[in-house]
Image (spheres, rainbow, N blue to C red):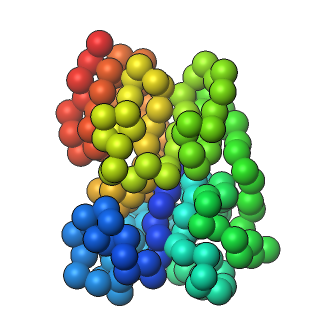
């Protein structure tokens, strides 16, 4: 059983393609890639934390709709666009997760955290604040799992820890080589 994290899928949100320069021709193409990538990374027995913004609030029952197509036990952290809360998913505003010997604070907006000494895993910033919120900012101890930062795939916490987080100063995206301290 794996534990994975992701954020900011924005299912069915046509304009997010332009806002974040996503490499999709339309929302249908984006939805298909997001679902396929999710299910290729996540098995039915895995736990996956979605750190906010499934889509846009005006789209009724969107979370119920898309969660039916996705593998894993989904635990969701509220994002600013998450208003429809289905009963089939567990919901929290934030969560502290211990994985191995590392504590992670899971939240949608990283700048809403005060006095946390370990790593913060978040979404919200997409790829629009790369200097402050790249995939990994070792100085701030933040990990940005907005899908634009992770090649549109969930991130396995085991893989994340294998990077030796405390040695990383900066890592632009999950596909890039880390800059070490």
The answer to which image quadrant residue 86 occupies is bottom right
Percent across and percent down for residue 33 are 33, 75
Say which quadrant the C terminus sits in.
top left
Percent across and percent down for residue 68 are 60, 81
| Residue 92 appearing in the image | yes
Q: Is residue 81 above or below residue 132?
A: below
On screen, residue 141 versus residue 98, left or right, reads left
Residue drawn at (37%, 80%) of the image = 14
Residue drawn at (74%, 62%) of the image = 90
Q: Is residue 42 above or below residue 121?
A: below
Residue drawn at (72%, 51%) of the image = 93
Q: Which residue is nearer to you in this view: 6 or 122?
A: 122
Percent across and percent down for residue 13 are 43, 78
Percent across and percent down for residue 22 are 27, 67
On screen, residue 55 versus residue 25, left or right, reads right
Residue drawn at (22%, 69%) of the image = 23
Q: Is residue 161 above or below residue 66?
A: above
Q: Point out the residue furthest to the top here.
A: 181
On screen, residue 121 versus residue 36, left or right, reads right
On screen, residue 111 versus residue 171, left or right, reads right
């Amino acid at each position: 059983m794996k534990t994975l994290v992701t954020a900011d899928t924005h299912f069915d949100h046509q304009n997010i393609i332009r806002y974040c320069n996503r490499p999709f021709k339309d929302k249908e193409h984006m939805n298909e890639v997001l679902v396929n990538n999710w299910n290729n990374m996540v098995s039915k027995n895995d736990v996956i934390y979605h750190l906010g913004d499934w889509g846009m609030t005006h789209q009724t029952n969107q979370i119920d709709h898309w969660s039916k197509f996705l593998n894993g036990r989904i635990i969701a952290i509220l994002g600013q666009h998450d208003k429809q809360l289905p009963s089939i998913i567990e919901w929290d505003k934030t969560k502290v997760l211990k994985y191995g010997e590392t504590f992670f604070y899971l939240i949608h907006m990283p700048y809403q955290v005060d006095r946390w000494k370990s790593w913060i895993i978040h979404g919200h910033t997409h790829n629009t604040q790369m200097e402050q919120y790249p995939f990994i900012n070792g100085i701030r101890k933040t990990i940005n799992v907005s899908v634009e930062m992770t090649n549109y795939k969930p991130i396995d916490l085991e893989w994340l820890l294998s990077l030796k987080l405390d040695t990383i100063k900066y890592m632009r995206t999950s596909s890039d080589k880390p800059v070490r301290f």
